[in-house]
Image: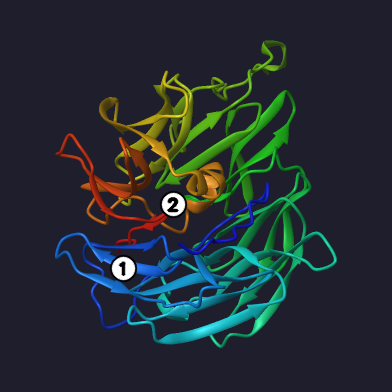
Amino acid sequence: MRPLVVVTFVWLLVLTGCSGADHSTDGAIVIVDDAGNVVVHDVIGGGVRVVTELADDRGAFQPIWLGSGIAYLEIDGQRGALVVVEQDGTEQRRAGFDTTPFYAFPQPGMGLEAPVVILRNAVAGGLTAELVGADGLVTDLSGGAPYYFTWSEEGEVVAHIGNDRLARMHPTTGTLDSAPGVFTAPWESTRGIVYLRRGSGGQRLTLWEDSSQTDVATIDGFVQFVVAGDRVALRSVESVDATQVVFQSLPQLPSNTLVVVDLDTRQVEVVTRRDVLMFFWDQDGNLLVYADVTDEGDAVQWHVWDDGEITDYGIFQPDPQWVSTFVQFFDQYAQSMSLWSPGGDAFAFAGTIGDQSGVWVQYLERDQPERIATGSWVAWPRGG
């Protein structure tokens, strides 16, 4: 098995797509196998396609769907590249870098032609954010760290840079808010950009809509959230000082609790008060899958929340590489890839159950997941 070097930076990040090549993506999952190659598994038909056959000193990382094509990061010692390919391995675009990219996020809905923002460590230190165009040309977007970002519906890159600013970075530039909250990934919702900002009495969950700000709720601590339509699933990992709660109409969100907040009504629904590791909306924004920590220490359990109803699934041990990269930055990754099948009838993950490790698919109507392959990375195509 070829070792795969992965950069685990405290501000790591992601990718996306739609439209593309000759192969169908119905039932297809892309993984990185134990040899470090990108492989597509057809979980319905059972077929397997090896997309890359990299030399022993190279490896693939973070493959993601671009419509019916695939983008991945190639690791080559201290150097690397962003590579866009068809499912048969035909290379469409390549951009090489003198340091290893550790995150990429294409503009949604544009398939193989999508411009892709990559993050990497600069040679002189610090962080570099760059945009790779459909022609392979690379444009510097500016540095700053930590650096979380989203693509707006209008095709703008909106970044939360450190605790300094929320700003447009491409194709126009300009600060939207000079007082963002504790850094976390902003999200595009059906209403506008959802992000955290600092306010009197604490931190606010805020909606940037039509060039104006609307505060939705107050919450303190380090926050991770994911958005689907006009609903936000959110969890803070710090307790709130009750003396800081301001007298206002905004709800104060509880700490150490997974909640769902409605952007329109500001209604808050508690999902669970257990210690949650990660959570994701399905592709239609109806179901929320989350994994909480069990009493067994290093094991976690999946649950699916459906408007107040919770279904429990199996216990597993997450793959260590998956934890060090994907899991701790799941809120950013969830914007550009999906653990959920396009039809919302299954989700996938990487880990160990019993004495078997690999990639697993959990169908909602089944009690136990199905192991489909070895590997450490897994992503379904996005529907729509």
Mark 1 or 2: in front is 1
> Real-space Cα distance between discs 1 and 2?
31 Å
Q: Residue at x 30, y 39 (%)?
A: 287
Q: Is residue 226 above or below residue 115?
A: above
- Residue at 27 percent across and 64 percent down: it is 41
Question: What amino acid type should be assigned to the residue bearing mark 1?
Answer: Val
- Residue 190: mark: 2
Q: Where is residue 259? Give x, y as percent.
A: 45, 27
Residue 224 vs 350, above or below: the answer is: above
183 horizontally vs 72: left or right: right
**Which quadrant, please, contains the N terminus?**
bottom left
Quarter of image, res 205? top right
Is 325 in front, or is 278?
A: 325
**Label 1 close to label 2 by CB (< 8 Å):** no
Pick out the residue farthest to the top. 243
Name the quarter where the C terminus is drawn: bottom left
Where is residue 279? Give x, y as percent.
43, 38
Residue 176, quarter of the rendered image: bottom right
Q: Report the residue marked by disc 1.
A: 40
Q: Is residue 306 visible?
A: no
Asked if one can make out residue 139 in the rendered structure from this viewpoint, the answer is: yes
Q: Nearer the viewer, residue 252 or 341?
A: 341
Coordinates of residue 289 in the picture (x, y in percent): 34, 37
Kind of element beneath mark 2: loop
